[in-house]
Structure formats: C-alpha cells, structure tokens
Image (cartoon, helix red, strand yellow):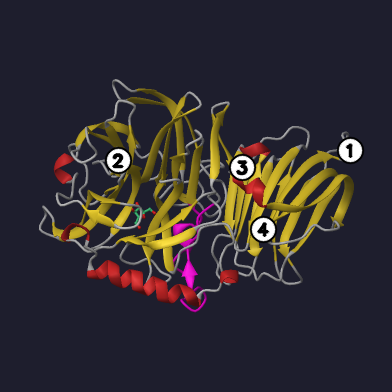
Amino acid sequence: MISQTLREARKYEEASEKMIEQEMRPEFHLSTRVGWMNDPNGFSYYNGEYHMFYQYHPYSSHWGPMHWGHAVSRDLLHWTYLPAAIAPDEVYDTDGCFSGSAIELPDGRQLLMYTGVSKQRLQDGSFGDVQAQCLAVGDGIDYEKYERNPVLDAADLPEGASAADFRDPKIWRKKDGTYQCVAGSRPADGSGQILLFESPDAFHWKFRTVLASNRNRFGLMWECPDFFELDGKQVLLTSPQDMLPQDFEYHNGNGTLCLIGSYAEETAEFTEEHNQAIDYGIDFYAPQTVLAPDGRRIMIGWMQNWDTSNLHSAKERAWFGQMSLPRELSIRNGRLYQQPVRELLQMRCNEVRHENVSFSGIIRLDGIKGRRIDMEIELFPGDVQEIYRKFAVRFAQNDTYQTSVSFRPHESILKIDRKFSGSRRAIIHQRRSKVNTVNGKLKLRLILDRFSAEVFVNDGEQALSATIYTEQEAEGISFFADGQVRMNVVKYDLV
Ligand code: FRU
C-alpha cells in the first residue's frame, strides 16, 4: 500500500531529524521535520487535533520533488510530527505533490486534495509540466491515492486556461453536504484567476465558474487560494506571483493578496470591495485557513519569501522553512485583522511590566530581554505639543547584532529592519508599512521565537513577519526615542 518512494522518505526523515537539535529549531512555530518546507497544506481539524501538512523536500534544505510533510497539534503551538503523508510516486504526480487542502469525509476518513505535477508532451510538441488535481484518502496517518486520479485536469478548464498553471485546490463542504473547491489558474492574458469547482461527493468534480480574475492588476499567476465567509463578508486570499508594488502595498515580489467583498452563493458571483496585502513584513506567503471547532477562522502562512529562499548553503542551514504563528482572523472597517491565536496566552509566563515610562534617547528596562517573548508596547507622545520624531525597539541585540521595529509618527510609517541580524547576504532586509496613528499613538505586539519576529499593529490591523537567524545569545532589548515618548511595556516569556 505504501510506495517505495514514501517508505524511503519516512525512513529518511526518522533517521535524520535526530541531527537537528531542539534548540536549533523554532520553539512554537512549526518548522520542517528535516530538509525543506514551503506552503502550509491540508490545514484541518480531524479526530480532535489540528493537522498541518506542508510542501516538503526531506532530502535537502532546498526545494525539490515535493512530498507532503505532516504534523498534528492540539493547541496550534506544540506540534508533533507524523510520517510524511504522500510522496511523488504515481505517473500523474511523479514531478511533485504540490499544494492542496484536507477535509473530513462523512464516513470519518480524511481526504487530501492536492496538485499532481508531471511532465507531458504539450500541444505545441514541447515537453513540460502539467498540473492536475488529485485525491488521497486516509486515517490521519496513512493515505491511499484515489484510483481515478486526477479528478480535475486540463479538460475541465475554461477556454484559454493553461494546463501548466492549474494548482493548489482548497476544498470545503457546503451546508447541503456537497463540496466546492477553488484553485489557481492562468488565463490567456498571462496573469491569474481563481476557478470554482463543485462536486456532490468530493470525488466527482466539475467546473462551475471563474470566481475572480486578476486581469494583470495584482501580480501574474495567482497561487494558493482560500475562500470563506468572515464576519458577514466574503474573503478571497491568494498569493500572486511577480507583484508590482503599489504605494505601501505588495512589496514582496511573490506576495499576498486579500480581497474582501460580497458573495451571491446561488450564482457564485464574488464582488470585490477592498484589496490589501495580508502581511506587511518580509517573510509571508501562501497562507491557508481552517475553521476551528469553536468557529474561529485561523490562518497560518509560510514564513519565508521565495526570493530569499534558496540562497543558503546546506552547511548554513540543516533545515529551511517555518510557518507563521497561527492567527485569528476578523474583519473590521472593511479590513482584515489578524491576532495571534489565544492559545498563545497559555504559554505566557514571567510577566514584567513597566508603565508610564517617559524617555528620550536610548534606554533599557529591567527584565525586558529574551528571544522567545510576547511583548506589548503602547506608545504615546511624551509632549502633546511636540510629537516625537521617531521611536524604535531593538531586539535580538548584542554588541554585534540587532533587529529593529521603528516608527515615525509624522509619516505614519512603521519599519522592520533586520540588516544587522547576522545575514551575510545582500537580500531585502527592511520593509516599510503605512500604519494608522493619531497624535503619535500606536500599539505594537511583538512576538519573538528563536528565528523570527512577528509584529501586530493596533490590535491586529496589520501584521509584519520576518525571519531572523541571529545567534540566540543576542537577547538584549532596548528602546530609542528621538523626542519625548511615553510608553507602557509588558513582556512575557513564552515557554
Ligand atoms: C506556492 C507554490 C504553489 C505550489 C507549491 C509548490 O508557494 O508555488 O503554487 O503548489 O508552491 O511547492
């Protein structure tokens, strides 16, 4: 039942994970078991646990033939690895089991829906990748590929859509018991579109409609869609490749896009009302959501950026790829809000609180340091007549290293800068984001794990994520103000 390819991957990961010490991994962010990880896949709740699968190349810390890695968790923060779920071992997926999703079937089995990639002779006579949607059914550990794979292929595409760019199905079950899925596609205009498919039983699929068309507005090909209702609105998440920056949005090359709108389910018409990036930091892509049993919509993204991902040597990194914090989503004033899952509060300990700290210049505060922390900062102008020019918090700091989050109230610009985090590559190290501020007030929540910093601004109005590979000894935190700042700081260790 289990192919030779999958058996080898399982044997390999079990033997090689031992070479990665616990302290060399993130503490509460899911990282690859061994080798390489990209997109979150099959994020679901099944048999009392959250399941997370991921794009996985166990054999090196670089992208390669895609398997699905697998881990489970009860609180979304402590993960246990399970054996690799699927491997590229069939004619229709020999070149990779690309991204997809998971769902529980009425008979209690778990269904994985993924993209099979295989090289085939194309219409123009050349040889190239063809992508088609496939199924595997299992018990939460072992999965069997469906004998009639693929269930959606080029023949199911609307006129003009490319057979080479058709991927990343996200499946859900409707109230009436039937199924739908969305997938990324490339229409004749060379950009992207999201297709909607439907099925009575999750096994027999047919095309329904083009749900959304890029028309070259936001990058080119649209990858990894997700589509759901949230707070009375309809949300389409996708990760466009090759984006052009617009103002302070979409600076990440292969970036993220959140379209908020309304949806007429009967006619499957999605009307866009608002667009924004999902994350405003450096490292975030291909997020996927799950509907938790308690009704929360929770999102996890791949906390990396494609353009900075395959640059390391195997010696530098035994593993590569981690997920973002799980984030609870909501919509306020037509914007997507993100807050770290409330489960994180359970990990908080050693509270250190400093209130009404008025300062200018550089200060350090008693007990404020650490590399696995949850810290909230409330900023106010120290002098209402003359609002400060700049505030910064510097962390993962010692004599050699630091990363900073700085804020210029007069320009309403927040900046994350990891230039001095220890990177030896001339890659992008800073990102600026426009934030909402009135009179120099701002709320920041900074969450550090061993190899990342995530900033949540104004109770989740914006999130900025960045990986940092600074050595763990650099655990200092200092504050800087040009002008007079008053602030409240509370910090917890996360253990
Ligand atoms: C997005 C992506 C997906 C694809 C997968 C391959 O990061 O390009 O579209 O399924 O990665 O690993």
Q: Secondary structure at mark 2?
A: loop
**Residue 235 visible (yes or no):** yes
**Are the two marked residues, 3 and 2, in contact with CB atoms closer than 8 angstroms?**
no
Distance between the alpha carbons at the discs numbered 3 and 1: 35 Å
Classify the position of the C terminus by image quarter. bottom right
Q: Amino acid at mark 2?
A: Leu
**Are the two marked residues, 2 and 1, in contact with CB atoms closer than 8 angstroms?**
no
Q: Residue at x 72, y 72 (%)?
A: 400
* Above-or-below relation of 278 to 123: above
Q: Could you say where residue 215 lies in the image, as x and y percent from the top left?
A: 33, 36
Residue that mark 1 sits on: 383
Q: Residue at x 40, y 54 (%)?
A: 53
Left or right of 174? Residue 368 is right
Distance between the alpha carbons at the discs numbered 4 and 2: 36 Å
Quarter of the image where ligand 1 sits: bottom left
First reached walking from the N terminus: tag 3 or tag 2 = 2
Q: Label 2: few (<14), some or many (≥20) within 10 Å?
A: few
Give the quarter of the image for residue 61: bottom left
First reached walking from the N terminus: tag 3 or tag 1 = 3
Q: Nearer the viewer, residue 66 or 144?
A: 144
Q: Could you say where residue 348 lies in the image, as x and y percent from the top left?
A: 70, 51
Residue that mark 3 sits on: 342
